[in-house]
Amino acid sequence: MKYQIVALNSGLDKKNFDCGNEQLNNYLHKQAGQDVKRKLCAVSAIIDNNRVIGYYTLSNTSIAREAIPEELRKKMPPSYYNLPATLLGRLAIDLQYKGQGLGEYLLIDALKKSFTASVEYIGSMAVVVDPIDEAATNFYSKYDFIKLPDSGKMFLPMQTVAQLFT
């Protein structure tokens, strides 16, 4: 891959980023830097000659024990009402770079970072996403994310993620 993934920083050109979704564009242009400074999330950017052409965010979250499928729930200790997870909050690719597999590339990078953190630094039993639209839902479905009932959110158990990297 000729593009590099780096932590979002003020030296990157993000002003021309346009993924076709105003909410995701505005987040990168106006809020992402502040969220990083406030330690609300980590933002990773894929760059082409210092220009942001895609990004994703990671932060901590939890899943209600009752929301996960029974076969997974029975493996979790009953004392946990909320199960620790990693939130892949946003993932977007600039329209000029669509169709090159960069969304998948960013997703794999996010899953790898989430898995590494869950093994080495902080517990996380799944990666959670909250798809912004039907296209995003279809994207995550291709990678075996499971819908959580009554929320629109989806998750991928860390055991499944582990199979990619072990």
Image (cartoon, grey):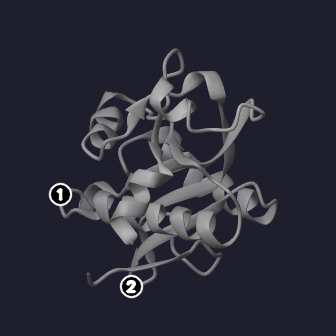
The residue singled out by tag 1 in the image is: 99
**Residue farthest top in this picture:** 150
Mark 2 residue element: loop
Residue 149 against residue 64 in the figure, above or below: above
Q: Amino acid at mark 1?
A: Gly
Query: 87 or 122, which lies in front?
Result: 122
Query: How far from the left and from the top, in percent, is residue 15?
Result: 51, 64
**Residue farthest left in this picture:** 99
Q: Residues within 10 Å of mark 2 (few under 14, many from 20)?
A: few
Q: On the rendered structure, is 66 left or right of 149?
A: right
Label 2 to label 1, Cα distance in Å?
19 Å
Mark 1 residue element: loop
Query: How far from the left and from the top, in percent, is residue 42?
Result: 65, 63
Question: What quarter of the picture does the N terminus occupy?
Answer: bottom left
Image mark count:
2
The residue singled out by tag 2 in the image is: 49
Residue 93 against residue 141 in the figure, above or below: below
Q: On the rendered structure, is 2 left or right of 159?
A: left
Query: How far from the left and from the top, in percent, is residue 124?
Result: 63, 53
Query: 24 or 129, which lies in front?
Result: 129
Residue 4 visible here: yes
